[in-house]
Image (tube, grey):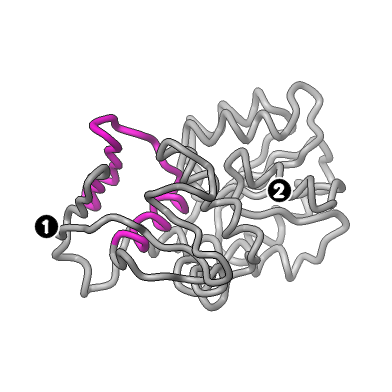
């Protein structure tokens, strides 16, 4: 995605400057914020295509900041933090982040992840030709409007992140078919994805919760023990 706006939110000036240099070398537009207040202003002002957040900020916890920003934009968000345990990563993903990188980090890895996330996000808004004639996917409880990027669940409009929308879109394109987490990682996140299986599991859980339940016993997105997940409603393509 050319001329993409990338926002990095970090209270360490050195990190912002170093990341900015590499981002601009790749042809992206670099913007920065040293705290949550500036981050909110930048999100409204530049409408970033990707956001990188630090967990520790002087005026607001990065986790809470991610939660609030996620209500403002569908852009990919990932954390850049010295907190790198499994629970930290799961917490970050559960509030709307798409990825999590621990400090210290490799600039080559960071750039690779930026490119991968931008490709995935661009794909969502530029469907492959075979799907472009399908505007609505409708099941018993869900009406997914591809053109308007809207999800209506049981006659209520619900807000989905870009990855949640893409995941639901894939499930509804293949109703009653069972897909392993590995298969979903490949088909929804892509061959070159930097995500892992835990990311898939977290996003399925978040999607289930927005569809009324986060239980493994969900009757809409079912867990097939030892096999994976399936969308358990018939779907009409319009």
Instruction: Please indicate whether residue 113 sits to the left or right of residue 131 in the image.
Output: right
In percent of width and height, residue 87 lies at: 79, 47
In percent of width and height, residue 151 lies at: 30, 42
In the rendered structure, are the residues bearing label 1 and label 2 in contact, judged by CB atoms less than 8 Å apart? no
Q: Was residue 111 drawn as part of the magenta stretch in this picture?
A: no
Please tell me which residue is depicted at 23% across the width and 31% down the height of the picture: 155
Q: Residues within 10 Å of mark 2 (few under 14, many from 20)?
A: some
Residues in magenta? 143-172
Instruction: Please indicate whether residue 124 sits to the left or right of residue 213 in the image.
Output: left
The image quadrant where one finds the C terminus is bottom left
- The answer to which quarter of the image holds residue 148 is top left
> Which mark is drawn over residue 238?
1
In percent of width and height, residue 165 lies at: 39, 51
Q: Residues within 10 Å of mark 1 (few under 14, many from 20)?
A: few
114 is higher (above) or lower (below) than 31: below
> Which mark is drawn over residue 90?
2
- The answer to which quarter of the image holds residue 99 is bottom right
Q: Was residue 151 drawn as part of the magenta stretch in this picture?
A: yes
């Amino acid at each position: 995605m050319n001329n993409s706006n990338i926002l990095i939110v970090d209270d360490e000036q050195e990190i912002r400057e170093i990341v900015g240099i590499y981002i601009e070398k790749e042809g992206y537009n670099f913007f920065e914020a040293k705290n949550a207040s500036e981050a909110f202003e930048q999100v409204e002002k530049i409408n970033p295509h990707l956001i990188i957040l630090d967990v520790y900020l002087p005026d607001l916890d990065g986790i809470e900041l991610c939660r609030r920003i996620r209500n403002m934009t569908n852009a990919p968000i990932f954390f850049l933090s010295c907190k790198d345990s499994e629970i930290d990563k799961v917490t970050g993903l559960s509030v709307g982040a798409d990825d999590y990188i621990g400090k210290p980090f490799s600039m080559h890895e960071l750039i690779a992840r930026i490119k991968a996330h931008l490709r995935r996000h661009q794909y969502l808004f530029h469907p492959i030709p075979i799907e472009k004639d399908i505007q609505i996917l409708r099941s018993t409880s869900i009406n997914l409007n591809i053109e308007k990027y809207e999800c209506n669940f049981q006659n209520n409009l619900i807000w989905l992140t870009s990855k949640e929308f893409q995941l639901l879109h894939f499930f509804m394109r293949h109703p009653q078919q069972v897909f392993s987490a590995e298969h979903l990682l490949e088909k929804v996140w892509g061959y070159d994805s930097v995500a892992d299986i835990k990311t898939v599991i977290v996003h399925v859980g978040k999607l289930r919760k927005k569809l009324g339940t986060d239980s493994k016993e969900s009757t809409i997105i079912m867990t097939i023990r030892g096999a994976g997940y399936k969308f358990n409603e018939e779907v009409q393509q319009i």
